[in-house]
């Protein structure tokens, strides 16, 4: 693959909400990286709230030994969070389509 083959390779996986829910039930930690007002408006059941901008200061809230699932509204901010966390050595997975897709899939939501 050459000298730069892995340089631009994503260091995390992206999964559909149904698979994310399965992983959550198996012990993965679901983290919602949206802003507080978005989270309070409705979030995936069981999600821990850590806004994207707070993640660098809240790494101690994220166990390295546990898989981390990140979710936002549509998948863009969670991809940023996944990139950052993967760079810090976390096993991290992005939830495709975010909370909007989670809701469309009929998965449980909380307020």
Image (tube, grey):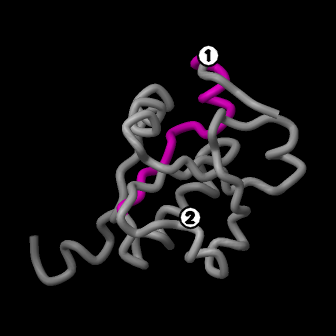
At 47% from the left edge and 70% from the top edge, which residue is drawn?
Answer: 85
Residue in the image at 69% along x and 61% along y: 50
Q: On the rendered structure, is 83 left or right of 26?
A: right
Q: Quadrant of the C terminus?
A: top right
**Residue where numbered disc 1 is placed:** 106
Front residue of this view, candidates 17 and 96: 17
What label sits on residue 80 in the rendered view? 2
Magenta span: 91-105
Where does residue 94 sit, x and y in percent of width and height? 48, 49
| Mark 1 secondary-structure assignment | loop
Vertical relation: 51 (above or below) 100: below
Question: Is residue 101 part of the magenta span, yes or no?
Answer: yes
Quarter in which the N terminus is drawn: bottom left
Q: Is residue 32 left or right of residue 21?
A: right
**Residue 8 within the segment the image draws in magenta:** no
Picture layout, residue 7 above or below residue 108? below
Residue 91 versus residue 72: which sits nearer the camera? Answer: 91
Crowd tier of the residue under label 1, counting other residues whose Cα lies within 10 Å: few below 14, some 14–19, many 20 or above:
few
Q: Position of residue 13 (x, y in %)?
A: 35, 51
Q: Is residue 2 above or below residue 82?
A: below
For the residues bearing labels 1 and 2, Cβ distance under 8 angstroms:
no
């Amino acid at each position: 693959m050459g000298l730069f083959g892995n340089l631009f390779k994503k260091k995390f996986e992206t999964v559909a909400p149904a698979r994310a829910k399965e992983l959550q039930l198996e012990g993965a930690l679901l983290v919602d990286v949206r802003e507080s007002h978005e989270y309070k408006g409705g979030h995936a059941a069981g999600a821990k709230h850590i806004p994207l901008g707070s993640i660098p200061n809240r790494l101690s809230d994220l166990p390295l030994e546990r898989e981390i699932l990140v979710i936002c509204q549509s998948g863009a901010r969670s991809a940023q969070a996944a990139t950052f966390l993967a760079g810090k050595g976390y096993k991290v997975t992005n939830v495709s389509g975010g909370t909007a897709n989670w809701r469309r899939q009929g998965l449980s939501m909380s307020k």
